[in-house]
Image: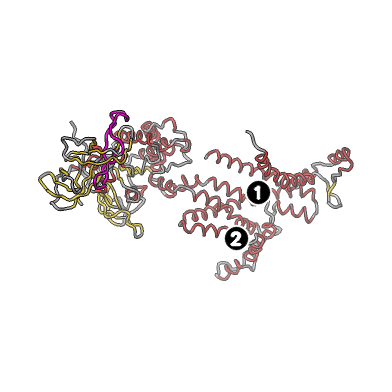
Amino acid sequence: MNRTLGQRLLVALPYLWLLVLFLAPFLIVLKISLSDLAVSRPPYTPQLDLSEGWSGLRAFFAELDFENYTFLAEDSLYINAYLSSLKIAGISTLITLLIGYAIAYALARAPRRWRPTLVMLVILPFWTSFLIRVYAWIGILKTEGLLNQMLLSIGLIGEPLHIMNTTTAVYIGIVYSYLPFMILPIYATLEKMDESLLEAAADLGSSRFATFVLVTLPLSLPGIVAGCFLVFIPAIGEFVIPDLLGGSETLMIGKTLWVEFFSNRDWPLASAVATLLLLLLIIPIVLFQRQQMKQEIGT
Amino acid sequence: MTPPFAPWADPDSAPLIDLRNVTKRFGAFEAVRDLSLTIYEREFFAILGPSGCGKTTLMRMLAGFETPNEGQILLDGQDLTPIPPAGRPVNMMFQSYALFPHLTVEKNIAFGLRREGVPKGEIADRVTDIMRLVQLTDFARRKPDQLSGGQRQRVALARALVKRPRLLLLDEPLGALDKKLRQETQFELMNIQETLGTTFVIVTHDQEEAMTVSSRIAVMRDGELAQVATPTDLYERPATRFVADFIGEVTILGGRVTTANRGGVGLAVMEGAPDLRVMTGDAPPAGTEAWLALRPEKVSIARERPAEADNALPGKVLDIAYLGNISTYHVALADGSIVKAQESNRQRADRRGITWENDVWISWEEDAGVLLPG
């Protein structure tokens, strides 16, 4: 195919964007992860010095090694943090799916003139800073917080619940924060579903429950898959929610990364953690993309 | 010789479907108004009407998707009204076909039988049989989006028929097909209906389709029945101006009854022309307004005044619609009203004598038209 120069430039633009803003920073992080900790500024060695020419470059590469990665594999802290992140992200995604599907279903079945308003309400929390909303949950969940006060005053509990600084608080935080990302893609698939399919199923003798399981659910699968990835991927690397709501009890890789970087000032190790996290996330992203491709070919 | 199929003419036969004074309102709008209708077993019944006439609402009430506000719908004498769609021995072929996009042809067709709890072996047999009937055997494993429009239409038909319903509803079944395929499919539908003996009710806005396939047609207008009759009766003996105009091409001339004799009347349509002679069964009294509905193919056109014709009027050719096999001439009479006359093109176009602006004579026999009340 013959492309004009302008078309080539247009195609090159997103690649250039990725190169400058994703690939280059990633290569820098990768390089730091292969370096050693040093008491200097910046706090790692070796540093690339092009003034010494070819021999300087060879000396630079000779000093890079996988020491930090072996360390990560040997210390169970890091493996546990990865596994714990996977578990928390997985369970949160499942809870978000259950709640999100119910809400999306209700939205799609609501009278047509109400739908824009209801979708607006789903997006409304985004108008406030994410950080502020997570802080607000501290006010709700803490021992003398709103939730405990309410439950105590109606006499449902005798003494305050300890939710704050537990994994439960992290689940609540993640489910709350990521719910819209689950609702919107599922709503999109349910909303465009041809209603005559449901009538056809009823006409053929299907009960309402059977129609849901056999028709509605399979047809909304693309939305479910998209929603799950949109929640699962960012939830694995989540730092703010476990840090603010989970306290010291919750071990998540995002938090470990932060501690290595800012508290221990061990940039090389933190970079190794980050690189591994990225690789861990790339797998579901690739799966997600393949699913999307399949869908596009399908239609 | 077996008598012609006409259970509606037999006072002893019991109808399969009996609609009694059915009314359906959406808010203040009456979609169907006090409608009574009987449909007999093995009929291919068409409900015909312009969009918004209530024909789809009527069908959806038969399927159970809408409940009438007043009146009853009986099937074999049993009231259907409280039975939900899933429980009715009625199946519907949807206008959009409503095929399940995630299921193969085979599974789409088996869907209804599975829900019914039919044994596996029987499902397989019945699905195989019906797929052979509608010629889908080669496409059993395909998904709906891998099929052509005609194939999808057949899947929808098979999926409804495999349930062996007492009544099959078809909502504009051929609307999405192109003309040639539509004509082929009409005959296929008729063959299938005859083979299975299922009662079909088809809803359509296409009068040609209704005329071709059905044993009887109900013409609807504004939520009411305008006329229920066989295709021939509907065409030859329309009951109202609306029906005459809706079915086929027609010229309608208004006039005043001058003489009312046994079997025929004289109709004055314009000054300076002789009264038209019209044969009619029940003649309105002299002096009343009446309309003459004339089918174009029953009107002849000639350069000279025909020697023997019951009615003949002079005019000028205004327009010629050339359709290949036939031509329709629009002839303006002295008072400006336009009469359509049709001639089959037995000769090649360049050898026929009549063209635009020619002075011509149109003529027809006294039994050619239908007299409609004013």
Residue B168 coordinates in the image, percent (x, y): 33, 42
Left or right relative to A210: residue B332: left
Give the residue displayed 27% in from the left and 37% down from the top: B342
Q: Disc 2 on helix, strand or loop?
A: helix
Residue B209 coordinates in the image, percent (x, y): 32, 39
Give the residue number, with chain letter if any, for mark 2.
Answer: A125
Q: Is residue B346 magenta?
A: yes
Left or right relative to B278: residue A256: right
Q: Chain of mark 2?
A: A
Q: Chain of mark 1?
A: A
Give the residue number, with chain letter if any, for mark 1.
Answer: A86
Residue B270 coordinates in the image, percent (x, y): 20, 48
| Amino acid type assigned to the residue bearing label 1 in the image | Leu
* Residue B191 appears in the rendering: yes
Residues rendered magenta in the picture: B329-356
Q: How is the image coloured?
A: secondary structure
Q: Disc 1 on helix, strand or loop?
A: helix
Q: Give the spatial CA distance, label 2 vs label 1.
A: 26 Å
Residue A171 coordinates in the image, percent (x, y): 62, 56
